[in-house]
Structures are given as structure tokens and as C-alpha cells.
Amino acid sequence: MKLLHEGTITNQVLHKKLPFSMKRLYLEDLPVIEQVQAKVMESLSEKATLQALTTEEFLFILNQKGLLIGAFVENELIGFRGLLIPEIDEEHLGWDIGLSPEELPKVIYQEISVVLPEYRGNRLQQKLAEVIMKELPNLEDEFRYICCTVAPMNIPSLKDKFTQVMYIAALKEKYAGLVRYILVKDLENPVAHYTSHVTVKLDDLKKQQQLLDEGYVGIDFQLVHGFYELQFAKPVL
């Protein structure tokens, strides 16, 4: 099995540094993938912050419709991250960010990203993101847009996406009525410059929607008097 990354990671319960590695996950890994997802869901105080994948969705990814990368300590799966080639239907995120029908096949989703509680605080989500994005060109199809959804109050996930230089392009109801940010990264035309910077309280979704309607995008966080505010700006195209 080809190793994609090797390093050390701290187990926060044992207070011990351990060697870990990353490799691609396959169909035979499905039982342990679902076990790790279940443990992570159980550990969350706010279950709505993570949209868990169904067995069918994992099967869809593992049957050549995406990519799953796992992190292992010895032979134990401690976290994983997925990319999904979505079906083109009315729920496609490409519609939400204003893409044309011709561009939809160029979209791939950053799907679920989970890390067992005892290995959090190691920037493992970010390391998994770096490794999985390096593997993206090895997929058969070529992709231009990386899209994903994030719950508005999910600060760790938003931080993860901003670190990858993704930006909030839309705020929509998805998944049977749950409000989600739609984030995107254009691999062919990454936005380098912004103007007209504005900060908005994290829970002021009405103001955020107004800014998005006016052509702003969400690009980062700012800590103001101990509270997070989102930074919006206009892209200089």
C-alpha cells in the first residue's frame, strides 16, 4: 500500500507522540471508516455541525466517484478526508455559486473530514487536506472548482476552509432545510486581491446574505472583543 505521508502526531489522552501515516482508503476499509465516523458523531455536542455520510454515499465515493484518504496510527484509522465527484442534479452546488451547466462536470466536492477526539489539536484536518489535494490530479477527470458546505457556526470547519484559501460564495438552505455556507476554490483562477473589506458578526446571517447579494465573498475570520466576526470583501477580477 502506497504511503502518501508519514510523520508524528500527539495522542492528547496519552500525552504521547506517535508515528502516523496516510494512505488511500478502499472498499475493504468501509467498516472501519463507518466506525470512526460514528465515534466522531458521538463526541460532538452539536450534531448538526457535521453532515455524516450514509453507507451509500461512502460506497459512491469508494467506487471510483471520488477519493478517501485515511490517517493511521499503527493500524488504527484515526481520521479521514474525502473528495466526491457529485451527480449533476438540482442539488448540485455549482448552481448555488452561479456556474453554467457546461461547468458543472468540472466541480468536485470536499466532503466529510473527521478526526478522532484524542487526536484533535494536531492540525490533522489541514494535513489531510494538503495530501488529498495533491492526489486530485491522479483522478481520471480534470476538475476546476472545489466546493463544499459548512454550517454557519462550525468555526473549526470554516477555519479549515479559509486555510485552504476557499471563500464563502453563497448562503443557502441545503439538506432538507439546514442553512449552509457554500465555499469554493477556483483552481484555474484563484482570487489574489480583494477590496472593500467589511466585518460581520458570525450569527448575523441576514447581513451576510445582503453582502453576498451585493457581490461580496467571505474570506476570513477576525477576533473582535473575544468574538469571531467574518470578513467579507469584493474580489478584484
Image (cartoon, rainbow, N blue to C red):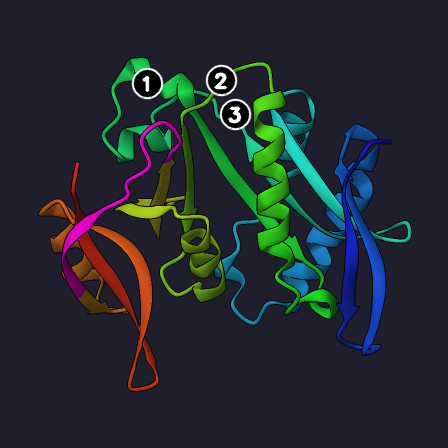
In the picture of the structure, the residue carrying the numbered disc 1 is 103
Q: Amino acid at mark 3?
A: Ile
Residue 77 x %, y %: 80, 50
Q: Nearer the viewer, residue 32 or 135?
A: 135
Range of magenta residues: 186-198
Viewer-nearest residue: 50 or 117 = 117
- Residue 130, picture quadrant: top right
Outermost residue on the front side: it is: 192
SS under mark 3 = loop
* Residue located beneath label 3 in the image: 85
Which corner quadrant holds the C terminus? top left
Please say whether residue 53 is one of the residues in the magenta stretch: no
Q: Would you call the spot at circle 1 few (<14 residues within 10 Å), some (14-19), or many (20 or more)?
A: some
Q: Say which amino acid is labelled 2.
A: Glu
49 relative to 80 in the view: left or right: left
Q: Is residue 142 left or right of residue 200?
A: right
First of labels 1, 2 by sequence position = 1
Q: Residue at x 57, y 23 (%)?
A: 137
- Please indicate whether residue 202 sits to the left or right of residue 3 in the image: left
Of residue 232 and residue 86, the one placed in the foreground of this image is 232
Label 3 and label 2: CA atoms lie apart by 11 Å
Please tell me whether residue 191 belongs to the stretch shown in magenta: yes
* Image depth: mark 1 or mark 2 in front: 2
Q: Position of residue 24 (x, y in %)?
A: 74, 34
> In the displayed image of the protein, which residue is found farthest to the bottom?
225
Residue 101 screen position, x and y as percent:
29, 16
Q: Which residue is mark 2?
A: 142
Labels 3 and 2 touching (C-beta < 8 A): no
Name the secondary structure under disc 1. helix
